[in-house]
Image (spheres, rainbow, N blue to C red):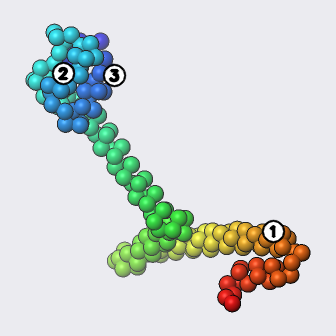
Amino acid sequence: MRRPRNKIAALSLELRLEVMQMLDDGETYEAIRSELAERGVSAEAMPGDSAFLAYRNGEEYVKHKAELMSWKQRAEEKKALAQALEVGGGVEGLVNIALYEATDKLLDALKSDAYDEANIAKIANALKGIKAVSISEADAKHRRETEAKATELKNSLASKAADPAAVQAEIDRILGVAK
């Protein structure tokens, strides 16, 4: 194993990860040195400014920055998807987004000079499948809501069965009849 060529590279992985994070956070070299001193790094092992500059351009730190950027990009994509699900009406909103995207691709395929019937058929089938999923999701949601209301009505009427006026009042409440 070759000897580290830089005082930062000679630090333990744990300390190097901390140094990377502090560099990412914009900490000054002096603040990083102070933290390293608190963590027990000796004065002779303490990196100078040139070591920090060399480390920033070194393979380990460059790879770290690339992985960090990749992770941030994936996190943003997941965040956008979560927002689409939350703001866009849950699964129905996501299905609508998929329908829009597939329709857009279909229009692009129809407009292109390289009119490919097989590709258009695939997109049309995808649209059909997305719509079928949307309809079955909506049916299931409607069925669950109806069953919940029926159970609520049944429980409410059962508790008021001895009083016909209370039963009628409950029916009127559920139907939204105002007196």
State which tag comes first along the sequence, 3 or 2.
Answer: 3
Left or right, 43 with reference to 72? left
Rendered image: mark on residue 14: 3
Callout 1 secondary element = helix
Q: Residues within 10 Å of mark 3 (few under 14, many from 20)?
A: few
Q: CA distance from mark 3 to mark 2?
A: 15 Å
State which tag comes first along the sequence, 3 or 1.
Answer: 3
Q: CA distance from mark 3 to mark 1?
A: 61 Å
Residue at the far bottom: name it: 179
Tell me the kind of residue under disc 3: Glu
Across and down, in percent, residue 61 comes to: 24, 31
Residue on which the image places disc 1: 155
Q: CA distance from mark 2 to mark 1?
A: 69 Å
Which mark is in front, 3 or 1? 1
Rendered image: mark on residue 33: 2
- The residue at 35%/76% (across/down) is 112
Q: CB under 8 Å between callouts 3 and 1?
A: no
Task: Kindly indicate the quadrant of the structure image that contains residue 28.
Answer: top left
Callout 2 secondary element = helix
- The residue at 89%/75% (across/down) is 162
Task: Kindly indicate the quadrant of the structure image that contains residue 140.
Answer: bottom right
Across and down, in percent, residue 111 comes to: 36, 79
Which mark is in front, 2 or 1? 1
- The residue at 34%/77% (across/down) is 113
